[in-house]
Amino acid sequence: MKRWHGSCIGALLVLLIGGGSLIFFVPVGGAMLVGMPPVFDKLTGWAVCPSAVSISQDEYNSGPVTTSPSGMSGHQEEWTCTFEDGSQKVVPNEEIALKGLGASFTAAGICGGMVLLLLMVIAAIIGWRLVKPKTN
């Protein structure tokens, strides 16, 4: 066996195990990002108005979601994005929610992919070092 065989085997093992675990880590990581309002708002701002100078957030319709006194409460938002030339864009609640969710899950996928790539490189280096080439 040659050194590059060990390198390929190490990287392939990490890819198989890590790639399968991304099916779990991306949804869970995306949901965690959605649960952190400052991070979610920043990611949503980049997705909705990428070149905006400022974004003002207006919250309305705050109240209980159910009739139960211990139930959850909800709200709606409307963002006004101001650009360098002074123009403004009003972003409705539905666009904020959908693009924010997409941005959060995309960020989780990118972070998971980068970690997987780093682990593949480390496994390839370890596999390369562990294999001793045959000498005839």
Image (cartoon, rainbow, N blue to C red):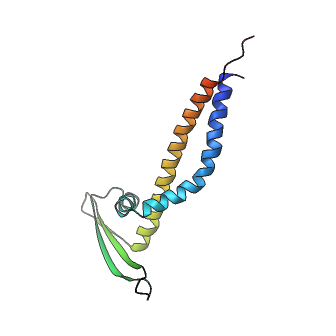
Describe residue 126's horizontal placement relative to residue 70 as left or right. Answer: right
Residue reaching furthest to the left: 86
Kindly give the residue lying farthest to the top in the view shown. Answer: 136
**Left or right for 28, reference 82:** right
The quadrant of the picture occupied by the N terminus is: top right
Query: Measured from the top left, where is residue 129 in percent x and y?
Result: 60, 24
At x 39%, y 79%, the residue is 73
Q: What residue is rendered at 37% in x and 76% in y? A: 76
User: Could you say where residue 104 lies in the image, as x and y percent from the top left?
Assistant: 45, 59
Instruction: In the rendered view, tell whether residue 59 sits above or below residue 2.
Output: below
Q: Nearer the viewer, residue 13 or 42?
A: 13
Quadrant of the drawing holding the C terminus: top right
Residue 134: where, in percent of width, then height? 72, 16
Q: Residue at x 57, y 28 (%)?
A: 125
The correct choice, above or below, for 92 with respect to 42 in the image is below
Where residue 96 appears, x then y in whole percent? 41, 68
Q: Left or right of 30: which side holds 51?
A: left
Please give the name of the residue rendered at 58% of the width and 34% of the height, measured from the top-left corner: 123
Residues 64 and 68: in front is 68
Q: For residue 88, which quarter of the picture?
A: bottom left
- Furthest toward the front, the residue is 70
| Residue furthest right as drawn | 136
